Image (tube, rainbow, N blue to C red):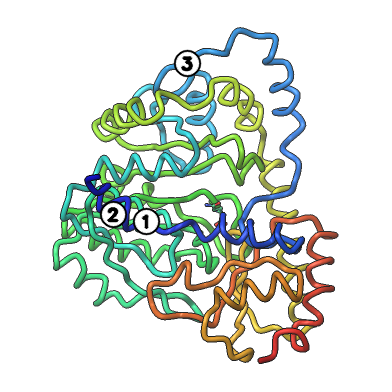
Amino acid sequence: MRKLSDRSLTLQDSIFAHMTAVCSRYDAVNLSQGFPDLDPPAEILARLRALTEENCHQYSLTSGAMDIREALAAKQKRFMGMEIDPEKEIVITCGGTEALMMAAMAVVDPGDKVVVFSPFYENYSANTILCGGEPVFIPLTPPTYSFDPERLEDAFRAGAKALILCNPNNPCGKVFTREELLLIADLVRRYDAYVITDECYEHIVYAPYEHVYFATLPGMRERTISCSSLSKTYSITGWRIGYTIAPPEITERLRKIHEFLTVCAATPLQEAVIPGLLADQSYYDELLRIYTAKRRFLLEGLDDIGIVHNDPHGAFYVLLDIGKYGYESDVAFCEDLAAKVGVGAVPGSGFFREPVNHLIRLNFAKREETMRAALDRLAGIDKMMRR
Ligand code: GLN
């Protein structure tokens, strides 16, 4: 038989799905794949129940039902401080995942170079490759995870057409400063490039750090496809509701791509999430309070055990240094950690382009009792994992 496509051949199995499978094999406490075990807001669940009696079981408009787009435009206006035309500048997508794929398809032609900061969420390189493009990785260097402006400019000098910006960053929790973002904006303007953001942790940024929406920087709105998701904000990762915000000409392309990929996001779920979008500031304050407490709980627990880790400024992940255990492969380490200690983590090599094998990622989007159980098990890590 003739061979299948080269593009599909380059894809690897997702490390998240693999680690969740490993966790269930060993009945490990799963702090690998990042999803909250908080309950979604009661209002959206009540609305979901009520919707079974209403007539919303067919396709919505491709860009999304008008009422969710209006509610989203109003919410994002509050947070981003800019007017957004729900008619022409929003597409409701099947999760942030589809939004990011659509954005790549709208911007990247075969052979185009796309800047991706490393560590990175695996979809950014996969999406670029599926579009026939070539990711160009720029390292974020610990402990501040800052980048070398010269190296970034070199990438643009070499013709990079777009940059994918995950802010706050999964997995290192970096929150880009305004100065860093202005520096990126300056290069993007000078080299006539686009920015695709992934801002799905926009509401999970710990004081004193603050989230700056890239599209709000001077001159950046026309060059930015803002991708985000309602998954983390309302604890509904399984609903697959995300969105793009972009200028009308770009949104027009995104809408057509979305039409051919999925037609529309699930209509009842679009409707059900609206009470979430209408929530006032107290909802976001409470969400942040909850995550601040969870972050503290896990980080202090790790400190008590003596496990060295980074200091995440946003999102809900922490990187642990496992260098002292002497494993050559962090994947083997994570498999042993699940089997022997009973805790599920994601190997850092799944995120870094550089040859990093001394880091693993845990997430703290979990109930305290879940994290307590993981910490109790991790207390025995030195005895169980020493080689
Ligand atoms: N974004 C989540 C994480 O980083 C889930 C990823 C996934 O399941 N593909 O863990």
At x 29% / y 49%, what residue is drawn? 130
Q: N-terminal of the two: label 2 or label 3?
A: 3
Q: Residue at x 41, y 59 (%)?
A: 12
**Front label number (2 vs 3):** 2
Query: Answer yes or no: do the residues labelled 3 and 1 have beta carbons within 8 Å?
Result: no
- Helix, strand or loop status at disc 3: loop
Q: Identity of the amino acid at label 1?
A: Leu
Mark 3: amino acid: Tyr
Mark 1 Cα-neighbour bin, 10 Å: few <14, some 14–19, many ≥20: some
Q: What residue is shown with label 2?
A: 129
Q: Is residue 228 depicted above or below 22 in this figure?
A: above
Give whichever of 34, 84 is nearer the camera.
34
Q: Quadrant of the N terminus?
A: top left
Q: Which residue is mark 1?
A: 11
> Quick check: which quadrant has ligand 1?
bottom right
Dot 1 and dot 2 residues touching (CB under 8 Å): yes
Q: Secondary structure at mark 2?
A: helix
Question: Marks 2 and 3, Cα distance to the nearest angstrom?
Answer: 30 Å
The amino acid marked with disc number 2 is Ile
Q: Position of residue 254 (x, y in %)?
A: 31, 33
Residue at label 3?
59
Instruction: Give the tally of numbered discs.
Output: 3
